[in-house]
Every structure is written in structure tokens, then in C-alpha cells.
Amino acid sequence: MNDHLKNPVLFVGDIDGDIDLSQPPMSGEDYIKRVVIEAKQCEDVVVARIDEARLKKPTVNVKTLGGCLEAPENLSPTYEWQKCQIDDFSSVRLKISRIKAERENYRQYSRTTVKFPDVDDKNGWVNFCLGSAAEESAPRHPTLDIIFCLNQAQVEQVLEYLIEEVESRGTVDCDLGQWIYALLAVLELPLNPDVCSSLRTLARSCSVARANLDPEEHEKVKALNLFICLVARYFRQLDLADP
């Protein structure tokens, strides 16, 4: 059926194998003959020979990020408990959104006199939210007046700083948990890739902390389960969810 495709397109006559290829072609026909001769000298399949001894090994170590650690049997939350937390969190976000809209509509937006650290000042924000042990300052609670005065860029950046604190401390205490919950409650959707990565770090860090809990620390499991639940089920990182 396709035999006609094998027929030569250009007729060049008989090809003399004694053509001196070192000399330039004298005509178009002569040039085509040289092309045909050179093509016959090429192998049908050519495989490159690689000297593996000259190849450099990769110098960048790629760290594979897995999912959350499975909860110990006695610390795993039920599906009903997780659904309840999602419902409560959704209600909190809705109420905060309504309050913010009402304040803006009636120009009652709080004018806080609190001075915020620069957005790039990680230590400043950690001390602002959690207090400094060196200065013996009390933690600042995340009131609506303060939260509403943060723009979305500040919300995302401060949340990242506090998640790094969870990762370094290996736990979520009361003050740290309150701030993270409050910032999650005003975090706008859809998530950008950097925020999504931070939230996944939060869930993984909480799962590691949960797996390492001592028996006398089991009262802390609710906060750890809560953040894993919110990240996985509310912010749709379902591969990190507890069953």
C-alpha cells in the first residue's frame, strides 16, 4: 500500500561509486549522488558511547518530603471528631468575615496603637506573638483588633514564622496554637504555593510531635490533631489526613 513511498523522488541515474568526494560537486545531480553515497555509509542506528568515569555525581541532595506519620492507635482522632472541627472552624471563619465587613461598612475598623515589627523580622514577630523569655514579656493574644490590622501578606508571613517555631520546638503550646489558629481563620483562599507548603510542614510537624508524645503529655494531642485535621481536610491537603 505504501510501496510508492519507497520510490525515489529525484532521478539521478546510475551512481558511480568512484566519485571523488573530496572534490566539489559540478551539478545538482552530482550533489545528489554524493548525498546518496554518504547516506549509504551511515549506520541505521547510532548509539552514543558514554564514558561514565567522566560523569560527575550530583552534588545536590534532594530531600523527599513524605506525608504525616500515622497516629499511635490510642491517639488517632475519629472521623466524626474531625468533621466537628471542620464545621466549627468554618463557622469561625464566617463570623470573622462578617465582623470585618461590618466594621468596614460602618467605618468602625479598629485603629490599634500597637506597633508591628517589620514583615521580614522573624524574631521580632515571634517575640511579638509569643513573648521573649529574655525580656520576661507576656505573650500578646491574637485579638480581632490586631488580626484585622494585618494585611494578607503579613498574615502569610507571620504564619510561616510560627510554623517554623512548631517545627523547631517539636510541639504546639497554648500561646503558639492560639496564634496559628487565628491566622488560619483569616487566611484567604486559594492558597499560594508557598503558604500551601508551610501548611503541609505544619501538619507533618504536628504528626511527628504526636508520635513522640510521652504518656504524661497526651493532653496535648488535641491541638496536634486539630492542626493536622484543618490542614488536611479544610485546606484540602487530603493526602495528609488521618483516616
Image (cartoon, rainbow, N blue to C red):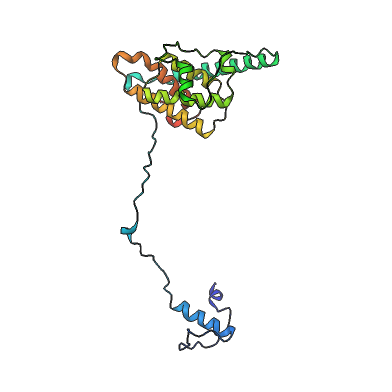
Which is more toward the observer, 89 or 100? 100
- Residue 99 at x, y percent in the picture: 62, 14
- Percent position of residue 216, x then y: 30, 13
Q: On the image, which quarter does residue 189 sit in?
A: top right
Q: Is residue 8 visible?
A: yes
Q: Is residue 91 above or below residue 62?
A: above
Q: Residue at x 43, y 78 (%)?
A: 41
Give the residue displayed 54% in from the left and 84% down from the top: 25
In this orientation, does residue 234 appear? no
Q: Is residue 71 left or right of residue 27?
A: left
Q: Position of residue 26 (x, y in %)?
A: 57, 87
Location of the C terminus (image quadrant): top left
Tell which of 85 and 110 is nearer to you.
Answer: 110
Work out which residue is located at the far left of the displayed protein and give it. 215
Please identify the residue farthest to the right as the structure is shown.
106
- Residue 196, compared with residue 128, is above or below; it is below
The residue sitting at 32% across, 14% down in the picture is 217
Pinpoint residue 209: horizontal percent, then vertical percent.
Answer: 35, 23
The total number of labels drawn is: 0
Q: Quadrant of the N terminus?
A: bottom right
Q: Tell me if 70 is positioned left or right of 11 in this view.
A: left
Q: Nearer the viewer, residue 169 or 82?
A: 169
